[in-house]
Amino acid sequence: MKPSIKGMIASVVLSEVDTMFGMQDPSQTLHQIERYMQEGRLELSEVMATQFCDMMLAKKKRDPQQQIFLLKGLRLMCDVYLMRDKADQSMASIKRMHSERKALVKILQKHAPQMLEAMQPEHEDHLRAGRLYAAAGKQRAASKAFAKCEKLSPGHLAAAHTATDLMPTKAHVDRLLAAVSAAGDVIHANGTFELQPTASPPVALETVLSSLRHASANQPGKAPACQAEITRLEGQHAAILAGEQAANARLQSALDSLQPKHDYYQYG
């Protein structure tokens, strides 16, 4: 029987992982998977991530670094499932990702507590899970994941706008409005306009505006509040372009607070 394309890819990947990178350097394998994902070679990324996770899971007694590699691999598995529109196949990977994170915390607490602070924040894994659940049509599970993300990191704008985009319920729109308000002023940084919450990743201004428009269209009762935020943000964007507002009002305010209120030399 002629081998399948998927089987041929798996064979190539197994050879690549075993001989080119080898389990002696799993970090290189993870970097390669990430590079393939960036290049759009998603089928190869999925097969390679699957084989990587299988090999790491076969190690029953993992040291802290091996557990970190496993968790990273599982995150990549989840990400590539979302990118390939295969969210319905990701349920086991989501569950395993959460359980292996808990296992990593226990391992680090016992063997390397100084590494706990360097872990990726837990709320990011719940955001990842929420996106997959929503894409798989599991709205209840998605809502719980987004709520958990925002509970762990209040004002998590990425979670709030994603939840609203996928499921524009009144509760999600309310959380979006609260998150947008808490994020503060528009900031122009590295050539992009964005909102920068204090304890979660920045979100592009156009993404936020799109989510607010979507929320307004789907929740008419919230349309006035959404429009007010749209007007505020668009006004700040225009003011920055016109030079009438600082590119980073938060930073400018902090700098201003460091300036002396009086010129004490005039009294000398």
Image: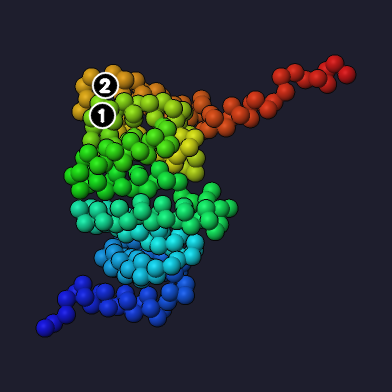
The dot on residue 222 is 2
Query: Where is mark 1, residue-wise?
Result: 215
Residue 224's x, y, as percent? 28, 18
Which structural element holds mark 2?
Answer: helix
Residue at 33% across, 36% down:
147
In this rendered view, identify the residue nearer to me: 266 or 131.
Answer: 131
Q: Amino acid at mark 1?
A: Ala
Q: Residue at x 49, y 61 (%)?
A: 64
Q: Residue at x 31, y 75 (%)?
A: 13
Classify the position of the N terminus by image quarter: bottom left
Please say if 235 is above or below 125.
above
* Circle 2 residues within 10 Å: few <14, some 14–19, many ≥20: some
Q: Residue at x 52, y 53 (%)?
A: 109
> Badges 2 and 1: C-beta atoms under 8 Å apart?
yes
Q: Is residue 213 visible?
A: no
Where does the image place residue 229, in percent across and percent down from the top left?
Answer: 36, 24
Q: Secondary structure at mark 1?
A: helix
The extreme left residue here reads 1
| Residue 60 visible in this rendered orientation of the protein | yes
